[in-house]
Structures are given as structure tokens and as C-alpha cells.
Amino acid sequence: MTPAKQPFISMRGVRYEYNPGTPQAQMALDGIDLDIYQGEFVAVIGANGSGKSTLARHCNALLLPQAGQVLVAGHDTRDPASLWEIRRRAGMVFQNPDNQIVATSVEEDAAFGPENLGVPPAEIRVRVREALAMVGLGELGKEEPHHLSGGQKQRLAIAGAMAMRPDGLILDEATSMLDPVGRREILATIQRLNAEDGVTIVLITHHMEEAAMAGRVLVMSSGRIVLDGPPAAVFADRERLLQIGLDVPLVARVADELRRRGLPVPPAVISKEELVKALCP
């Protein structure tokens, strides 16, 4: 009998409140039950204050649950002895790429994480070379980070995480401060890491078009997961999304309008490619 597959990230009854016991108290996570499996590409969306960034920070022990349990690769985030292993296995990329750069050259910055893990220098050089190649910065190792574009800086942050050989990446609004070119660079990078290297991706985003690229979408509202499923199924529930302050991707709105005008567009269309195929079979 084949053993059951274990989740990469598992949450049970997770609760987290900011400013507990004060008039400013805010429940950010209210009884979260969630399993994310190795190799999944999961997008998390929600209105401001829905709890999505707090959820992200629980995925690699930057925040610890006040109630319930979070396991990352089988390690309890509340166990201090597991902290470094958890952060090695689940890399984190934040919103502002400038806040994540710590060195004076691209390759030195990518080496920072492995150095802190005590990886031998020869192995660090191999990891840095591989990680920079993964994100398309292989020719820029000697470059000073401040010469990079916003998208390149964010790719460098991803390379720094990948040099620690993680099983997954958690990206908390990692494209929100980038221009359209930078956003495309980051999305192409994480899609490639997921498809070719099997890296688990948890993408926190407020861009519906980005969420539509994932294999699974979680919708959060008031600290709870209110929708969970494939993008086509989640974005088909437009009324529910509008109720919690969200909308569907632009392509889905265009498809809705075309259907109202009598064109035979299937209800599950959420990408440009699907729309073109429906209109030009």
C-alpha cells in the first residue's frame, strides 16, 4: 500500500490576533485549516486586512500561531530547534526588493543565506552559480545590486532563497512594487521554478491576473479561507468575490461581456490564451 503523501505546509486551527486585549485588537487568522503539498502553485488573494500576509509569515515561522499548529516539512514552527531548517526549506521573498539586499555584489548577496547556514565555501560557490542561472542573472554575478532594475533585484532575492535549496518559496506581494516588465520577469521565474524544478510556490498577491496563473487559489476574508479551488472555479463565483471586495481577472470580465453579447465563450475562460482559443477555434 502506498503511504499517504505528506503536506509541505500544514495548518490546523491556527489563530493569530494583533494587539490582543486592547481596543486595537484585530483577528488576522481565525481558525485556519490548510494543507499545501509539495509542487503546488498556490495563490492567496483577499482584500486589505484579510489576513493573507499574516498567513504567509506563518509559512516559515516569522510569526508563530497563538493557537493551533503549523508544520513545515513536518517541523513544528513553535520548536526553536527547527527554526533554521524551516527557513531553509521555505524561502521567503518580500514586497520591497531593496530591503532584502545585504551585500555589495550580486553573487555575494546570493551567498548570504548559505553562509549563515554554515555551508562549506566550495558548495556555496556551486549553489550561487546554479541559483543565479535559475533566475537569469548568471552573467551578472560581479554586478553591484544597486545597478539592477527592480525586477532583477527581486530575482536576486529569489536566487538568495534558492541558494539555500528550499522546497518552497513564499512570495508576499513580491510584484506589487515592480513595473510591468519587472512583474513579468518575476512571474516567469516562479512559473519556471515550479514547473521545471518542482518548487512549491505560495504567492500572496492582489493582482487577479497573477492568481489566475496558479494551479490553486485561496481567497481570504476576515482571517478565514472562504474559497479554495482551481482558478476557473474560484473566479466563476464572481458574486462572492464582489461581496468581499475582490474582482475577477480582466480576461474573465471580457469573456462575461462577450457571452452577454451572444458569443459562445465558455464560462471557465480566465486567460488570454483560452479566450483566443474560444473565439478562434
Image (cartoon, helix red, strand yellow):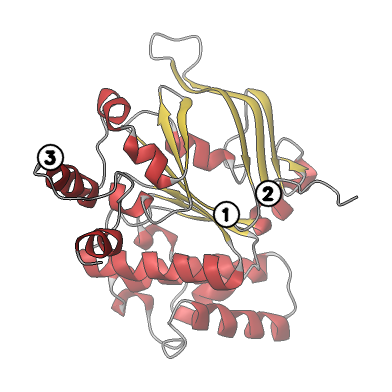
Q: Could you tell me if residue 22 is visible in this image?
A: yes
Q: Which residue is mark 3?
A: 260
Residue at 30% x, 30% y: name it: 241
Q: Quadrant of the C terminus?
A: bottom left
First-in-chain label (3 vs 1): 1
Q: Is residue 253 left or right of residue 135?
A: left
Residue at 46% x, 24% y: name it: 223
Looking at the image, is mark 3 or mark 1 nearer the viewer? 3
First-in-chain label (1 vs 2): 2
Q: Which residue is mark 1?
A: 40
Rendered view: 263 above or below 166: above
**Which amino acid lies under the numbered mark 1 shown in the image of this protein?**
Glu
Q: Is residue 250 left or right of residue 76?
A: left
**Which amino acid lies under the numbered mark 3 shown in the image of this protein?**
Arg
Q: Contact (CB < 8 A) between labels 1 and 2? A: yes
Residue at 64% x, 63% y: name it: 166
State the CA–CA distance, disc 1 to disc 2. 9 Å
Q: Which residue is mark 2?
A: 8
x then y, percent, for residue 85: 73, 54
